[in-house]
Amino acid sequence: MAKTTKKKALGRGLSALLNDPNNDIKSAEDKNADKVVGSIVELSLEAIEVNPFQPRTSFSEDALKELASSIRELGVIQPITVRKLEFNKYQLVSGERRYRASKMLGLETIPSYIRIANDRESLEMALVENIQRQDLDPIEIALSYQRLMDDIDLTQEELSDRVGKNRSTIANYLRLLKLDPIIQTGMRDGFLSMGHGRALVNITNTDVQLQVYESILKDKLSVRDTENLVRHMQQNKDTSKPSSKEVKVDEKKTKALKQISSYFGAKVELKVNKKGNGKLIVPFSSDEDFQRIKKLIQGDS
């Protein structure tokens, strides 16, 4: 019984400290800061503002309703984390879903873990904590990584240490930001996976990216199917490019090539270099086809 009374007295003391304008704590060096930082206290929801650094930009209404139902039955089990801005004013660092669900229920207060941080520290805390969440989509994670690198001025290696991920993993996420915005939206909406995105990012032409994206949706292509399609497109593109040592075939040779192709009954390929040297490539589809072409070359009837 005495233990319970002591706990309540501590709670009243902390609340009184936070509600006293003469004891406004803004930094870790301020008087009584050690009594506030790291404490969990019921804060008014009206005194808390959302975090502009929050990487999640969309919240499922159905998921929020489910969470609100859970909070109605069990309460907020895990406190949110806030940073103290000024007197009776706080900003979310993490726990926006719990915050939103509590407001949806019309609750007046929410258990909060108090921290003191500047904007840079708050940004880093919010992004790093939220990156660890399991329900962020690949684009949200990629944007969070990019923002940490830009705003906190981190290299990929430093970022790797901060978030506990391999550098190659971070690089793969960042590459997704090269995708066309329409495809990024498709990933955020769950129409295709990160595996699809990693295959598509190998296509530099955004128009071609969108064509493959449409094929993925229309034909319900798996990641493996998409990888094979992209690989096939790239191989065809490579073989269609003339070598730097090759020159364009002139009109006379083009006309002759048509006649040769007609004679062999196959599409004969002609390659010519700058010196005028070249080669004819006669394709065949089987052993029987090879023998047929051989007889034509030898002049056998």
Image: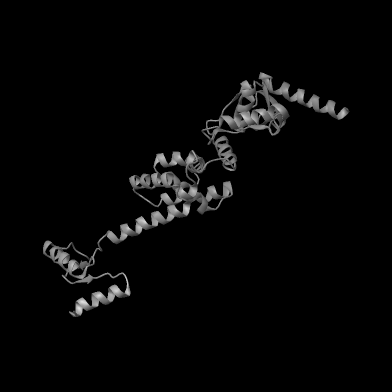
Q: Which of 281 and 40 is in front in this view?
A: 281
- Relative to 225, residue 99 above or below: above
| Quadrant (top left, top right, bottom left, bottom right) of the N terminus | top right
Is 110 positioned to the left or the right of 296 in the image? right
Which picture quadrant has residue 177? top left
- Relative to 265, residue 44 above or below: above
Provide residue 213's location: percent of width, then percent of height: 40, 45
Provide residue 219's location: percent of width, then percent of height: 42, 47
User: Looking at the image, which residue sits at the far front?
Assistant: 301
Q: Nearer the viewer, residue 194 or 161?
A: 194
| Quadrant (top left, top right, bottom left, bottom right) of the C terminus | bottom left
Provide residue 210's location: percent of width, then percent of height: 37, 44
Provide residue 87's location: percent of width, then percent of height: 63, 22
User: Looking at the image, which residue sits at the far right?
Assistant: 1
Q: Residue placed at 41% from the left, 44% from the top?
A: 218
- Colouring: one colour
Q: Is residue 182 visible?
A: yes
Q: Residue placed at 40% from the left, 39% from the top?
A: 182
Q: Is residue 115 visible?
A: no
